[in-house]
Image (cartoon, coloured by chain):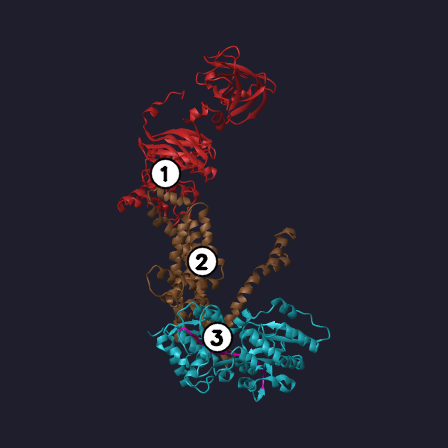
Amino acid sequence: MMTVVSAELADTSVGPPRWLASPGKIVVRLLVYGVPTVMILAPLMSFLAYSFLEQKDNIVTGHLTLANYAAFFQSGSYLYVFFGTVKLAFVVATVALFLGYIISYLIWRLEGSTRYLLLLLSALPLVMNYVVKIYAMRSILGFNGFLNSFLMASGIINAPSKLFIFNQTAVMLAMAVIYLPFGILPIFLALERIPQSLLSAAADLGAKPGQIFLTVILPLSLPGSIAGALFVMVIALGDYLTPQMVGGSEGFTFGRAIWSQFGMAFNWPFGAALAVVLLVTVIALIGLASLIARKARLG
Amino acid sequence: MTAALSEEEVVRPNVIQLVGVTKSYRNLNVLKPVDLDIKDGEFLTILGPSGSGKTTILRMIGGFTPPTSGRILLRGADISQVPIFRRPFNTVFQDYALFPHMTVAKNVAYGLRIRRRPAEEIKTKVAAVLETVNLTDKAERYPSELSGGQRQRVALARAIVCEPQVILLDEPLAALDAELRRSMQEFLKDLQRRIRTTFVFITHDQEEAISMSDRIAVMDHGNLIQVGTPQEIYYKPRTEFVAKFFGENNLLPAQPDNNAANILESPLGKHSLPASAKGGGSFLLAIRPESFSIHDGSELRQGQSVCVGRLENVTFLGATTQLSLNVGKAQQTIKVRVPTGQSGNNLAFGDDVPLRWSEADVNVLPRG
Amino acid sequence: MKRREFLSLTTTMAAGALASSAFKPAKAAGKELRILTWEGYADDQWVKAFEQKTGSTVSISYTGSVDEIFAKMTASGGADFDVIAIETSSYKRLTQEKLLQPVDLAKVPQSSNLLPAFRSVSAIIFDGKPYAVPFAWGSIPLIYSTDTFKTAPDSWSILWDPKYKGRIIVMDDANNAIVTTALLLGFKDPFNLSADQFLQVKAKLLEQKANVASYYAGFDDGVSIFAQGGIDLMMSMGEPQAPMLRSRGANVGLTIPKEGAIGWIDCWAISAKARDTELAHAWVDAMLEKAVGTYISEKTGYGNTTNGDANEKIGLTYSDRLVFLQAPEDFGRRIELWNEIKATPVQQ
């Protein structure tokens, strides 16, 4: 990529005038637009192609078939896991939206350097290793974890509880915490995009702080925040490790099901079909997010 | 103030009074103590270069920022601590600050809706105000679909619909191009006359200030320097800054005469020192180029003086012609503006031109 | 195949030294041996000795998963590698896809070192010909808390005991779970289940789910959950989890229940398109030196196939009680079943 970019730069500085469409320029254009397109599209296309291939006795026969998709839509357990995962991601995104909005709003209301310091702090988990974060969550929620120790020390419970680990609550808690920074940043940006003068104008027109929030801040920041939450949902959809590691026997998600087809069953066509189902879902969500974001910009 | 107050000014009561108002951020004094009376129904312009503190004054009146010290009175009552949303003022912002997620009608209705006015009243008033600003047909548009001038008028409508006691305008025309600006100036002035509401208008544009205002408050470096009608500000500047700020002016050094007290000596000759300009040291004389005329030898009236200048340059400006002349021993250059017809008497460079002026038009300023 | 993660993490291989041997320029006229293996299975000292002895150059490619081995082998029909190390259950597929050639034991004189239990492992014999030579082994034992159990539980059925509800963890591995359950149910061939046996296994695993706190994701994950407390029993991923747990303060024991347990064997095999089959056989032979076997046991904690004393020293005395992994009848079906188990909500 770097060499392609520098070739384009060199072209504009020492090459023939811009209006001269030299063959070299066309090549550079092709490289600049083509290489990333190919690099992104090629693997996706191969997935798509694989999902229509027939596999018999562990060997891909090369015949085209819809059987892989049929298998998904007819299988109770894969459908169940798929919708369970979508629901989980939705809940995680909703929690991230809710908590993320509150945190972003509080940070946004601050002034001076504390504001950016806190924002930086809230984004810091993004640079932490993801597995480390899961382990950290588990050491908080776990049987002899921080939460239990705290509750026991404060006399609320007598023996460590398994209420916070290896169940759906744990999955939602852990994922919400892990994905919160992904929510905080877009929401903060959505708030930051609201011109200060609009708030002044609202106050000037007689709105009290609560009215300003409801009539100006919320409607203007909500679309961007929802778009941010949808992206959290997209990331959460693909995460199978967190549910696996904190969800106990209820931590099975669609990503893990896809993985099992590739890594364990060696049934790539079926795995690819499952992956395409997830991909279509993700694309739909991203489309929805950008639609909301665009509408927000226009409005 | 030397000029006598006009009858109108005497009659009009004050809406807002700033009493010893200051503003400082940390250690920075952005506003030195300011006393300013704003009269009911007037179009007051606060004029100054950027950083002079004019917007700070507006923001303090509006309630966006509290004064560091001093009081702000509304018809005699101290409102310094009244929160922004309870002040009966409305602001037109420099960037209009229209709510992008609301239609024009909703934007205009905002202040009434917040105050929970009956729906019928809101509807009627919004329609009437949109009519006033000629935007009836744009009621259902969004701000992003409007031109700059239209947005400006929505911002105005949004402010006036609340029937505030004062409308504060923070450089509302700065973002418009020259042509639109001129028509908006006329529109604003006309609007203000029709609705008879006090306008406090912020600008850094002198011509705008002079053409629109009933009175102008000139600010510089956090100081309120002079308040007066455009004519007073223009012809009777009280500081060098004001004298230089508006249009072309002649500023000449003047020293007290060694022999006679109360007599100043300048390149133009001798002047009597007015009582208001006390103290020793040197002074500046300010006299507008158009205050001079070419002396035709007729008899001088009371208070008129003459001198002779050597013609250095002639600039044709259309209706007037500007002459550059050297006067006095130091060959000080002054500019003289005369109707174009008057200067056509075969003047040649190097000619001595006799000038005449009224001493009343000479302003004696302390040297800054 | 998660034990690889453990292996790659805990073996104290000097990665730099290994890398340098991998990129050694081929000697102009010399022979070259290309190895595809797990980290820890081609230690520098053996490689050097082998190179000196045979006058060849060894280049090693390390792999992280069985997937990768299949992908790399199928990409060239095996032409890119001479020898590979892989576990018994993969041989059915490797031979089906004709990626391997039989090992000529006449060219592997040190095969006489093999302990009796590893002389005729059925999973690597096809058409009567051996396709690999066993090298290292281990099991999927039951690990239990010695605080809770004064004596080792003697049956896998303990994992179904409601007394330990919520205090049991099981690895998230379809085949291991199904084979172990089949062993408990007493099925003769746990790798070829009938439709009815499938149903029984499924019912049994669903029943177990109510007891399971978590299906853990890997070596470290299992150790971490167990060590955090509240867990009494685990279907382990391999012997090394026990010392890891002890080092983290958990009092645990390890046992092979009376039904037996899954065993695995990593074997050396020769690629169908090996360039120099003589040299490949020489490598396989060299790996059967007793010294190498001893080293494997001491270093990794896994069993070796040549030195019984070294196995005994680390407590791996039960190779005869293990059921060594074979390719199951239908891996996809087993995955399907396991996914169904995991997807079914627990019946409280």
Q: Are marks 1 and 3 in contact (CB under 8 Å)?
A: no
- Chain A shade: brown
Q: Which mark is residue B63?
A: 1
For the C terminus of chain C, the quadrant is bottom left
The chain assigned the colour red in the figure is: B
**Residue type (three-letter) at the residue carrying disc 1:** Gly
Q: Which residue extends farthest right? A: C29
Q: Disc 1 to disc 2, how far (Cα)?
A: 37 Å
- Which percent across, then down, holds residue B202? 42, 35
The disc at residue A182 is: 2
Front one among A177 and B217: A177
Residue type, numbered disc 3:
Met
Magenta stretch: residue A241 in it?
A: no
Residue holding disc 3: C237
Question: Which chain hosts label 2?
Answer: A
1 or 3: mark nearer the eye: 3
The span picked out in magenta is: C130-147
Q: Colour of chain C?
A: cyan
- What residue is at 56 percent from the left and 89 percent from the top? C127
Instruction: Characterize the local packing of mark 1: few (<14), some (14-19) or many (20 or more) Cα atoms within 10 angstroms.
Output: many
